[in-house]
């Protein structure tokens, strides 16, 4: 495999480990400065130049795009995608994860646990927003920031208002987030590669510092995640469109709460804490994808009019709950179940005797009209209308009837 690591820091620990892991496995690997690319759109096919010369052919790239060059860096990644070069982290996934508001909006639609979060711009909306997330203390986050930079703990409402007003005056956008007291100074970093967590560590802040980032002096220790935490980390990364990601989670009273999904996770802390070859796992995954790439079945199987692939969530009360697949009536409706997802368990090509449970996700191929009919009607949001008391009719006024 010929691999390009897109990085402006060739001597950084993570870049060096990835390069060494690739070389140790017999791959041809180059570290290329992302800013030295030129996107060539002048020819018949998409192309790239590097340092002013035509780029040679690569099988795969591994983007290590810094925050400061997200726009240009993702444009380069997107050009590689146009050239059919494999990347575990596509441009849209990197872009999604870099904007904290955008990432939160995406994850909020998929039953992923997160701290209560609001986003406002008008000064009059700040106090109600603070109350909606549970009141002070609150955590304030700039939309773009890494390594704990731009994350502030406001101990009371007045301080929160002053900080937000100051940030808004400098044209900064800020999220208001509930402070999860039970996990103060601690969080979990799970390193997701493909469809599994290859390593996980707990980060613990030092002293009175509430941010647990290693760059803020936090200590690390290995941790074995239970099924719920592992499932949440993998789902969060996949929802964001990332196949290699660091997922940061708080340990809430009711389970994991996702804080951030990082598209260029550092490897030094987690490899030191776990003594695992995380870089090697990433390289092996990329090599396997180059040798036998995953396909988008939604595109490949749309071969007949009216047929396609869809994922169906089995809701409580659905008529197929508690029935074997052979008794569910799906085959009679011309629907085949390709994969059954149950929590963190994946059952490919499930057998007819498999009993369907509420909460299962079925990846199916069949008649789109039949599958669409199985999706419950979306519940309309109830909007609370403030009722005004009846107004008295004063002398001299007439009532419209």
Image (spheres, helix red, strand yellow):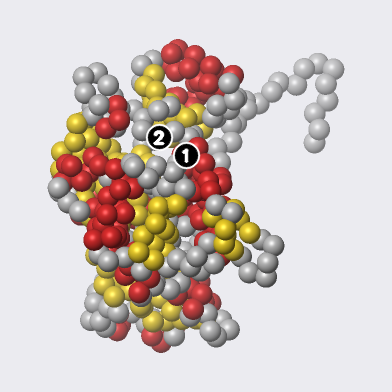
Proximity of marks 1 and 2: CB atoms separated by less than 8 Å: yes
- Percent coordinates x, y for residue 345 in the rendering: 24, 65
- The CA distance from mark 1 to mark 2 is 8 Å
Instruction: Work out whether residue 375 or residue 226 is closer to the camera in this orientation and state it.
Output: 226
- Percent coordinates x, y for residue 387 in the rendering: 60, 31
Q: Quadrant of residue 310?
A: bottom left
- Percent coordinates x, y for residue 314 in the rendering: 36, 66
Residue drawn at (53%, 48%) of the image:
36
Image-based side of 228 in relation to 389, left or right: left
Image-based side of 320 in relation to 79, left or right: left
Secondary structure under tag 1 reads helix
**Residue 146 numbered mark, or none:** 2
Mark yes or no: residue 143 visible: yes
Quadrant in the picture for the C terminus: top right
Label 2: few (<14), some or many (≥20) within 10 Å?
Answer: some
- Circle 1 is placed at which residue position? 67
The relative height of residue 134 versus residue 318 in the rendered view (above or below) is above
Label 1: few (<14), some or many (≥20) within 10 Å?
Answer: some
The relative height of residue 126 versus residue 299 in the rendered view (above or below) is above
Residue drawn at (59%, 54%) of the image:
52
Quadrant in the picture for the N terminus: bottom left
**Residue 214 numbered mark, or none:** none
């Amino acid at each position: 495999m010929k691999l390009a690591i897109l990085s402006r820091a060739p001597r950084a620990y993570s870049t060096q480990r990835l390069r060494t892991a690739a070389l140790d496995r017999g791959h041809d690997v180059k570290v290329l400065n992302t800013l030295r690319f030129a996107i060539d759109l002048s020819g018949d096919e998409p192309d790239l130049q590097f340092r002013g010369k035509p780029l040679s052919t690569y099988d795969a790239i591994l983007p290590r795009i810094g925050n400061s060059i997200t726009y240009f860096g993702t444009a380069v990644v997107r050009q590689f995608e146009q050239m059919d070069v494999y990347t575990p982290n596509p441009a849209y996934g990197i872009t999604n994860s870099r904007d904290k508001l955008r990432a939160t909006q995406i994850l909020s639609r998929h039953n992923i646990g997160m701290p209560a979060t609001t986003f406002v711009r008008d000064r009059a909306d700040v106090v109600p927003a603070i109350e909606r997330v549970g009141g002070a203390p609150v955590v304030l986050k700039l939309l773009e920031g890494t390594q704990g930079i731009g994350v502030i703990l406001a101990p009371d409402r007045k301080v929160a208002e002053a900080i937000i007003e100051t940030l808004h005056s400098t044209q900064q956008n800020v999220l208001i987030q509930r402070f999860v007291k039970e996990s103060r100074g601690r969080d979990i970093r799970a390193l997701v590669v493909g469809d599994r967590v290859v390593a996980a560590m707990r980060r613990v802040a030092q002293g009175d510092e509430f941010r647990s980032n290693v760059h803020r002096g936090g200590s690390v220790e290995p941790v074995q995640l239970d099924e719920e935490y592992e499932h949440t980390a993998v789902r969060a990364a996949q929802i964001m469109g990332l196949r290699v990601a660091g997922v940061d989670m708080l340990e809430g009273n009711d389970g994991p709460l996702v804080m951030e999904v990082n598209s260029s996770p550092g490897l030094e802390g987690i490899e030191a804490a776990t003594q695992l070859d995380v870089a090697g796992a990433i390289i092996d995954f990329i090599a396997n994808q180059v040798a036998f790439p995953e396909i988008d079945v939604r595109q490949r199987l749309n071969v007949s009019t009216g047929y396609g692939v869809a994922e169906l969530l089995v809701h409580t009360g659905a008529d197929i709950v508690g029935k074997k697949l052979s008794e569910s009536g799906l085959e009679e409706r011309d629907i085949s179940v390709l994969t059954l997802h149950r929590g963190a368990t994946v059952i490919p090509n499930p057998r007819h005797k498999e009993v369907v449970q509420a909460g299962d996700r079925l990846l199916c191929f069949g008649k789109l009209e039949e599958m669409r009919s199985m999706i419950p009607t979306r519940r309309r949001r109830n909007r609370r209308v403030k009722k005004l008391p009846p107004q008295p009719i004063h002398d001299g006024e007439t009532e419209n009837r």
